[in-house]
């Protein structure tokens, strides 16, 4: 703990960025491989409708992700600030509270998800074979709710402590296992191939959760289970910070559901299949930015807790610039070779050709999302859940929902694809305004402490 704390408070931000972000990015990419590879294997080994089914099921699976993120980000934010303050009493409460919350939320989600699978998929506009396959796939995925929620939220706590390599390793084991099991079980299950893909994912999540549990019970020296119970003193902080992270996941469900519905309404099943592929590609390329933000969180949180405000500002700026560069690494090849990228999911060349231009448009200003996610992480790390929540709501609900409902009714299917970059451009400008305003507030606090 002391070694990690000293590094977070004293090491050069650039060095910290490489040390924390490389394993965090690899770890998050590995997490993203779960659903990404399900889509690839379903499309290549079963067929386009199976890929469509996995695609429309994906936003529903984010219900679990949103709960894991609420608990994990909220807990890791408290942890990193507690490390900065050397608050051992708070640190000792983190894991027992986390497990209690995971059990409560996961049982509720699993029960509702299994019972109302078909109704949830109806919301995406799925129908026919795609709907039937989606129901069969998603019911099994919901069985793994407790395991995936614990694994992901506990992994976020590890990152909040600065243990990026360990977090990457544990998530990597699960993802590699999923990639190995996916094609095997798809083939073995035969006519129930879509169930095979889901079972592969759940088995991987169970093993991953067991490994992470073992770490906190036997291996971790600083953060361990003490008493498994809901700590009411931690809940206000967890929910105030974690709710914005949860909203990002939960609002994605609404956002993607509307995109699927509008794609189906104005373009038919081919556009739904294309949208499924496009959203999976965008979600996967967004994951490295999420990994970068996981590296930023302990740096900002620990230094903010220690009142080192100039390091908070400097570190945030460095991470923002690096994240834009990282986004371009994914953005450029996709803009140059959209046909090949879409072809990973869709074997029908006619459908691929139909979607190339709109896919490029949808992805056109992807790098500005780097600023958006870093701004949200910055506010979460300093405990400002309000501004983090505003940024999420603006992009995924307040600006998006009226735009996606109104513009396609005027301009047709093309509008379904260009709404996303339009909103991202507006939110980028608002992100810049809010973060520079907060920098000024931090400077005012610093000056007040120097000159009381």
Image (spheres, rainbow, N blue to C red):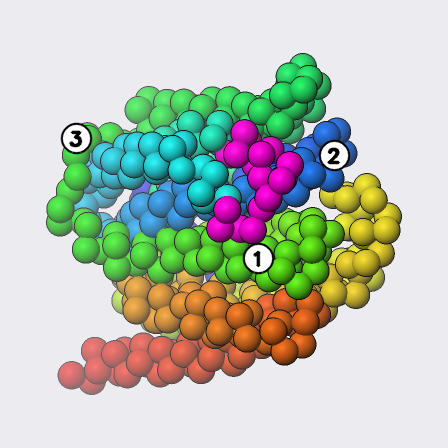
385 lies left or right of 341 = left
Q: Reply yes or no: does residue 79 show up in magenta.
A: no
Q: Write down the residue under mark 1.
A: 261
Q: Could you tell me which secondary element the residue under label 3 belongs to?
A: loop
- Tell me the distance, in whole angstroms, between the alpha carbons under discs 2 and 3: 48 Å
Dot 2: element: loop
Q: Which residue is mark 3?
A: 227
Relative placement, left or right, of 262 versus 203 is right
Magenta segment: 122-138
Q: Quadrant of the N terminus?
A: top left
Mark found first going from the N terminus, 2 or 3: 2
Crowding near the residue tagged with mark 3, few <14, some 14–19, many ≥20 C-alpha atoms within 10 Å: some
Residue shown at 13% from the left, 46% from the top: 232
Q: Name the residue rendered at 54%, 44% in the picture.
A: 58
| Image location (x, y in percent) of residue 275 | 66, 55
Indicate whether 257 appears above or below 63: below
């Amino acid at each position: 703990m002391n070694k990690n704390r000293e590094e977070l408070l004293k090491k050069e931000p650039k060095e910290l960025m490489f040390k924390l972000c490389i394993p965090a990015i690899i770890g998050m990419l590995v997490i993203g491989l779960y659903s990404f590879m399900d889509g690839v294997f379903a499309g290549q080994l079963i067929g386009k409708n199976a890929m469509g089914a996995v695609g429309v099921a994906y936003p529903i699976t984010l219900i679990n992700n949103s709960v894991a993120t609420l608990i994990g980000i909220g807990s890791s934010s408290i942890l990193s600030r507690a490390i900065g303050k050397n608050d051992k009493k708070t640190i000792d409460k983190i894991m027992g509270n986390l497990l209690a919350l995971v059990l409560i939320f996961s049982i509720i989600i699993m029960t509702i998800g299994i019972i109302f699978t078909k109704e949830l998929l109806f919301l995406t506009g799925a129908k026919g074979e795609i709907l039937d396959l989606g129901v069969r796939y998603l019911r099994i995925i919901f069985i793994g709710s407790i395991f995936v929620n614990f694994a992901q939220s506990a992994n976020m706590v590890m990152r909040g402590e600065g243990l990026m390599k360990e977090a990457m390793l544990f998530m990597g084991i699960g993802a590699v296992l999923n990639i190995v099991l996916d094609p095997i079980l798809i083939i073995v299950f035969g006519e129930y191939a879509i169930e095979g893909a889901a079972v592969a994912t759940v088995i991987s999540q169970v093993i991953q959760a067991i490994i992470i549990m073992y770490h906190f019970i036997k291996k971790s020296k600083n953060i361990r289970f003490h008493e498994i119970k809901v700590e009411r003193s931690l809940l206000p902080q967890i929910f105030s910070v974690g709710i914005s992270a949860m909203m990002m996941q939960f609002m994605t469900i609404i956002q993607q559901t509307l995109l699927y519905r509008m794609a189906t309404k104005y373009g038919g099943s081919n556009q739904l299949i294309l949208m499924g592929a496009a959203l999976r590609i965008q979600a996967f390329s967004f994951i490295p930015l999420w990994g970068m933000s996981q590296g930023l969180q302990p740096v900002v949180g620990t230094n903010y807790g220690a009142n080192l405000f100039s390091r908070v500002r400097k570190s945030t700026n460095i991470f923002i610039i690096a994240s834009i560069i990282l986004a371009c690494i994914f953005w450029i090849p996709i803009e140059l070779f959209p046909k090949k990228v879409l072809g990973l999911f869709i074997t029908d060349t006619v459908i691929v050709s139909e979607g190339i231009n709109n896919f490029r448009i949808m992805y056109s200003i992807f790098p500005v999302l780097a600023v958006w996610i870093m701004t949200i992480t910055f506010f979460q790390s300093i405990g400002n859940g309000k501004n983090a929540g505003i940024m999420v709501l603006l992009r995924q609900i307040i600006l998006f929902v009226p735009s996606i409902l109104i513009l396609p009714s005027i301009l047709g299917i093309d509008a379904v694809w260009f709404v996303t970059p339009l909103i991202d451009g507006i939110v980028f400008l608002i992100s810049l305004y809010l973060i520079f305003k907060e920098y000024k507030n931090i400077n005012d606090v610093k000056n007040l402490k120097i000159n009381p």
